[in-house]
Amino acid sequence: MTYIGIFIVSLNALPAAALWSVMSGRYYTPGVWNGLAPFVTMTLAALFVFFALVTLQGLLLNMVSPRRFPGVSLLVQCTLFTLLICLLPFVLSIPGLDRYMHLRPAFARWIPPAWFLGLDQEMLGNREPYVEALGRLAIWAVGGSAFCAFAAYLWSYRRQKVRMLETPIQARYEFTALRRWAEKWSDRFLPHQPEHAVFSFTMSTLSRSRLHRLVLTGFVAVAFALIVESFVSLIVGGGFKGFAVKTFALEQAAVSAPLALSLFVLAGYRYLFRLPVELRANWVFRIHEGGNRELLLRGMERFVLCLGVLPIALLTLPLEIEIFGALTGFAVSLLAFLPSLVMEEVLLAGFEKIPFTSAYLPGKRPLIETVCMYGIAFGAYVGILSGLIVTCLQEAPYFLIVLGGFIAIWAKVRKGRLEYWHVGELEFEEVAEPTVQTLAIFRD
């Protein structure tokens, strides 16, 4: 609690002081409340969010069994983190919302930021009934969330302590149902033991490592933020007339969803696979590398396909059917699925490692370069391909040409990647780039 208090105060003190200095001028009436009111309201808003999260965590402790709590808690955390990332682009549009507040909209009573805006205006001397009502909602929200947070933890402290101590340790593993399902069906799709070993090792690592899950959630959240921003921009810009009216912009936004998700999820997998977990455990794969190199790499490929490309296609299929109809929606999903396969081949090309088993050298590329690369890739992969897919749906010959082109590109890229599976060695120690490049002549 002390750390949270220090963090909130230090976070809000500088913006409040800066606002006071920025507002000074000819039409500014100086006063202590001009700097104190924003600081108090921002601090109360932060405390409201903190106590609301604590209340949610306390409810989960009481309503969910210890066996399922880690998985449910992780799901809630990932959902909240994704919502946070999705809402960040709308922060830039806040200065343009003043014209809506001049109309005193009734829906503002259901928006927590508006409550604290009303409290700020009330502290500055605004005595309108509308502003006072919002200010009272802010005070009740902070007090209610604080009471609920303390009540939830006081009520469940003793009982939860006993439950956690008496629960077997092996029951606290996360995603037990998913692992049991995977163990049941993986033998049919992964008949060879090396493939099965890499697939199971990768899944177990992601289900247990919170750091890797957090990074992957960040990639997925950015993709969802871009998708949501495209639909919201369409609505705010006046181009949205409902799903019944199939405009080009709406169809392109729908096609962009699977493309954006596949780009960031596959890129996130490739980045995560380079981050080691326990390097001393890679001896298991080292001693089985001889004669099994191709099978080990195939296990990684199957994991990306089964838990990356295919789930995205199935997840976005209802959206495509809703926008385009049943038959055209399946066609759109197929056209978006093939570029995902191409992207998988491109990202796995030259990646000759077992996930999480190789030493990692960070900082080899500047951050601004990485951001620019992702920006260019998003514009080219998502923007151009979505427009191409929507355009080719107008005529059946165009659809067949684009479909055949995607299949030919995928076959060409995959053939080029598989040519190097039979030669070389798996990489367990990442080293710096050599001064003199060999142009891969050592493979011949």
Image: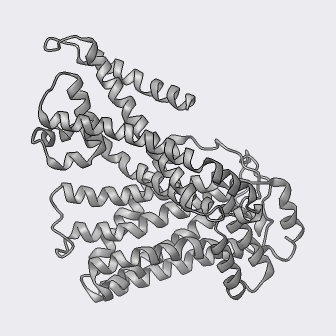
| Residue sitting farthest toward the right | 287
Q: Position of residue 377 (x, y in %)?
A: 45, 57
* Residue 219 vertical position relative to residue 101 in the rendered view, above or below: below
Q: Is residue 125 above or below residue 441?
A: above
Name which residue lies at 36% across and 84% down.
331
Q: Looking at the image, can residue 420 be seen?
A: no
Q: Is residue 442 visible?
A: yes
Q: Nearer the viewer, residue 30 or 229?
A: 30
Residue located 75% across and 77% down the image: 195
Residue sitting at x 33%, y 82%:
329
Q: Quadrant of residue 133?
A: top left
Query: How many marks overall?
Result: 0
Q: Which of the two residues, 285 or 84, is positioned nearer the viewer here? A: 84
| Residue 13 position within the rendered picture, expressed as x and y whole percent measured from the top left | 41, 21
Please determine whether, in this image, residue 211 is positioned above or below residue 383. Answer: above
Q: Is residue 365 above or below residue 68?
A: above
Asked if residue 165 lies left or right of residue 264, the reply is right
Quarter holding residue 239: bottom left
Where residue 429 appears, as percent x and y from the top left, is 80, 53
Q: Quadrant of the C terminus?
A: bottom right
Left or right of 149: which side holds 201?
right
